[in-house]
Image (cartoon, rainbow, N blue to C red):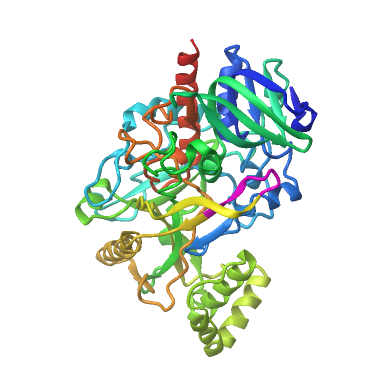
Amino acid sequence: MKRDASTVASGTTLKFDVCLVGAGPAGLAIAEVLAARGWRVGLLEAGGEKPEPEVQKSAEAVRRGLPYFRLDRARTRAIGGSSWMWLDEGARWPLDGGLRSRPLDRIDFEERPHVPFSGWPISYEDLEPWFRKAEERMGLDSLAYGGTADGELPFDRSVVETCVSQFAERDVFRRDTPALLARENVDVLLHAGVIGVELNAEGTAATRLRVASASGWFQVEARQFVLAGGGIENARILLASEVGRPGGPANPFDQLGRYFMEHVHVDSGFFVPAPGARVEDLLALYRRHMAGEHKQIRTLRLTGEAQQREGLLNTVTEFLPRRKLFTSAGVRSFAELAWGIDARSAPEHVVRHFLNIAAQPHRVAAAAWLKRRGIHEEQPSGATLVMTAEQAPNPASRITLGRRVDRFGVPVARLEWRLTPLDEHSIRRTQDILDAQFRAAGLGQIELKWGETHPNPRIHGCWHHIGTTRMSSDPRTGVVDGDCFLHGLSNLSFAGSSVMPTAGAVTVTLSITALALRLAGELGRRLG
């Protein structure tokens, strides 16, 4: 059943077998599995049944470090979580026809000498069966990820390979929600803000949650607790609890909130075809297409062997056919400043951006005219490289608590997004390797690479909040163990991308779902 938390009398204690905090894709997946097995499930959601403007305002946070999106736009508080943003046709981060999906690569799980803090406490093989179950849940074809030899660009396949992503339907996580909410053994509490986690005297198990509502506060007791609020909220909730403060029983080594990662996304480099070649002919294989009943897209990726040999991070590259006009310094600078105004976050090198615009006003005006009329990608002269890379784990990139409080009196999150030299080096070196492959094949070349323009194209994220409660085999380097339970606690676990030690170079929802289903299986085992 579904009800507003304000209907719970202040001071009441609710009891469940399992209490889940957060009704996004991870929380819903776990709730469905455990409810189907007959367990009594409590699902606490800070938002309502649908996104609400006033609730969204409280999702904003303090932003420091690298310029980042407004967080009230990059996540949603409602049943379905941030999957609501996939349904918004006017979203600032378009999904180009669906939810892009691909499993992590094997190399993402490995300890790599050139990537500090890399390596998962579980292997690809441990998670592979759960990827298959997640694909089934999302309506994906588990056999569709391999590249195709027919018509591929003639690259050295020991260096560069084609990889495939599928597109799931954007409402895939909300189709079965009404049936879940109708279950008698599921109690969904809306507008319920968790304000504290309490442990037993020994610090070995969670005993209850303190929850705020519009009418007061109440307590929730359960045999198992799961924080499934996303990479920012999972850390914030526990940091705001006394037990989660640095040095506290749930954060003894000050690891909670650290290693915040995003997928490093940048439009950098411009592919110029060789004389007599057409960019559409060369890159037709790497455009979105239908493969049977599934929409797919192929991208280029350095092989695992090439990444190891070069000491690089995992990166995928696709191509956006474009007129070279849109790569001019003035046009790029105008776009950067427009983004900064919209995001309320000033980009770096503001003065230089204004100088670029002042030096090329005619190009800025021409680009604006073409884009306004929707013809900016017609008759392309080349293609921009759209690169999505993993971010190296960095303990200085983190979530802490700000001074302001939200509507429940809990300190807002403070996001400090920091990159390392390896992140930028990987982008540039990957471009150099792709350039060499294009030239060797006689297809063209890549110009305007990272480091050759000033300012460089803005690095931004993809709304993927990763790593703040990372898995580790040692509590001195992480927050949860290989089963996603807080180190040293038997009944407090985390779901979602916050547990990922490294990010890979693919979107996170398929991995989130696989990890959630795996955790649901472990919870069922522990519940008996």
Q: Is residue 133 visible?
A: no
Front residue of this view, candidates 243 and 135:
243
Q: At which x and y percent is residue 98?
A: 58, 44
Question: Going by the image, does 106 lie left or right of 412?
Answer: left
Q: Quadrant of the N terminus?
A: top right
Instruction: Please name the residue shown 76% across and 26% down the image.
Output: 8
> Is residue 165 a member of the stretch shown in magenta?
no
Q: Residue furthest bottom?
A: 359
Q: At which x and y percent is residue 39?
A: 59, 14
Front residue of this view, candidates 458 and 490:
490
> Is residue 409 a member of the stretch shown in magenta?
yes
Q: Is residue 471 visible?
A: yes
Q: At which x and y percent is residue 190?
A: 72, 33
Q: At which x and y percent is residue 239?
A: 51, 42
Question: Going by the image, does 347 lie left or right of 49?
Answer: left
> What stretch of residues is rendered in magenta?
406-414
Instruction: Please name the residue shown 44% across and 38% down the image.
Output: 248
